[in-house]
Structures are given as structure tokens and as C-alpha cells.
Image (spheres, grey):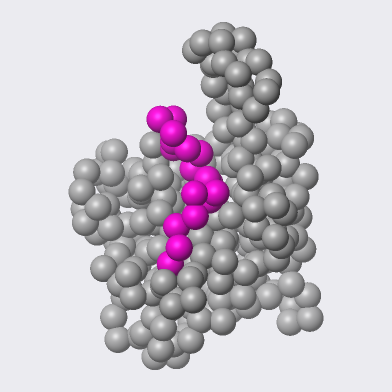
Amino acid sequence: MGKNILAEKILVEVAFFCKELARLDGKPSDIRELTNMSISNVISSIIFGKRFEFDDPQFVEQLNSLNDIAKLNSGTLVLNFFPFLFYIPVDLFKVEQIGTERAPSIADKPRLKYFTAVIMEVQRRASILPITIPYFCSTDTTLAGYTIPKNTVLMPNLDAVLRSKEIWGDPENFRPERFLDEQGHVVKREELISFSVGRRVCLGESLAKIELFLYLSNLIQTLQFLPARPDEIPPLKDTWGLAATPEPFEIKCVKRNA
């Protein structure tokens, strides 16, 4: 499918999502369920040609079942012992960088270089999928002096690369500038392997990158995201399972003034 078609479907759902968050009117809320519904609706609109309302009981039940499956796998990714960054100081972005006269589109991405670098740093720092699906070694192989016999089961540790001090210098710091050169242009570093690498790279990488840009740019343009309590930001803690996900937390979604 063409990227323009994907972007159009995503923007339709983003509009519903922003409207639903604005209805919270600054009330401290856990928006994880709404976020899951919105992202799931993108997939639904692509596969089934329709979206579900946020209060659809069957839709809610299906998503709750999927969440329960993820929770039951808690603890399986024991190698992922770093916290997941799920609080983003979005007010760092000035109104002039995204604009308010229209909704951001995928065509704006080349101009929003710092914003693109922020998304890349979020992906690196979050390390949501620290370990990939299992691989089988198809032939006897020698790598870095180690012999890997044929049919050995391998599970690449992406977290070891995304959090490597030797590669990033200060991996625990949130620093988007690491993805910008001296002229402010975006640098695509091969060590950013959030979607894995090689022939078995994540099939949803293209869709996910479009979603990340359109969702975040539209959300930041439309709403302010504030701590539920001004003197206390959400803790940097995650839950281990099929993915490294943040523990429940509340934020305030406040509609920006036009």
C-alpha cells in the first residue's frame, strides 16, 4: 500500500483521538486504553475497512484480552532491566516549529528535523521491544570468534545496542541532538535498530514510523500534556512482558488555545 493512503487513514483516526482526549478537559487520566484503541483502529481500517467506536463493547473486550495476554507474559524479558521513557516534555516544541493553521501531514516531515530527531531518540531510549523473535542459524557460523552451530536458536538483544554506552556515550540521557549533524540535518544512524535489522526486520516498520510522526505531531499541535500533579511527574518504571510497557500513570490533556 502507498504511504499516502496509509497517511490518510492514520490522519482520520488521529482526528478522532485528539477529539476524545480534548473531551477529558484537563482531568487527570490514564490514556493508555484510548491510545491502544486508536492505534488498533488504524489497523482495523486498513484490514477491515472500518473503525470501531471507543465505547464499542466487543472492541473493548478484544483489546482487554490482548492486554491480559501481554500481562501474563510479564517477566519473560528478564534482560530488559532499564526503565521505559514514557514522559516526554512536549512543551519543548515551539508553536512556530509545527504551526497551528492546519494539521501536520507526512509532507511536513522533511522540514520538522528536530521533531524527527525527537521521535528517533524516543524509540532508542524507550527500547519497547528489547529482544526480537527467535531466529534459527541456517548453517554453521563463526562470529567474533564464537562458533554457532547450525539450527541454534538465537534471540538478538536489541536493548544491548540501543542502550550501549560505547555507541551512544550517554545512553540514559534523552538527547535528540545525537540524531542531528552540525547543520541540523537528520542523521540516520545504523545503530538505531528499534525494528530489528536484515531480512527479518519488522514488517510494520513503515506503518509504525508514519503513525509515530502523524500521531505525535497532531497531538502536540492540538493538546498540552501535563503531569497530573504539578510537582510530580510519572515515574520511569516499566512492566516486563512481550514488550517493555510503562506502568499505569495519569496525565492532563489540555486543549491548546488557537
Residue 151 visible, this angle:
no
- Whole-percent x and y of residue 239? 72, 45
Instruction: Place residue 69 in its image quadrant.
Output: top right
Image quarter of the N terminus: top left
User: Does 183 sit above or below residue 243?
Assistant: below
Residue 44 visible, this angle:
yes
Q: Would residue 118 be found to the left or right of residue 161 on screen? A: left
Q: Is residue 194 magenta?
A: yes
At horizontal 65% and vertical 67% (from top left) the residue drawn is 174
Camera-side residue of 244 and 250? 244
User: Does 29 sit above or below residue 77?
Assistant: below
At horizontal 52% and vertical 45% (from top left) the residue drawn is 193
Can you name the residue that lies furthest to the front here?
145
Instruction: Place residue 116 in its image quadrant.
Output: bottom left
At horizontal 49% and vertical 43% (from top left) the residue drawn is 195
Instruction: Identify the magenta region.
Output: 186-202
How many marks the image carries: the answer is 0
Instruction: Place residue 214 in its image quadrant.
Output: bottom left
At horizontal 77% and vertical 45% (from top left) the residue drawn is 81
- Whole-percent x and y of residue 127? 62, 49
- Whole-percent x and y of residue 99? 36, 85
User: Does 123 sit above or below residue 100?
Assistant: above
Image quarter of the C terminus: bottom left
Q: Main secondary structure of the magenta part?
A: loop
- Whole-percent x and y of residue 82? 75, 50
Q: Is residue 143 magenta?
A: no
Camera-side residue of 203 and 223? 203
Q: Would residue 240 be found to the left or right of residue 183 on screen? A: right
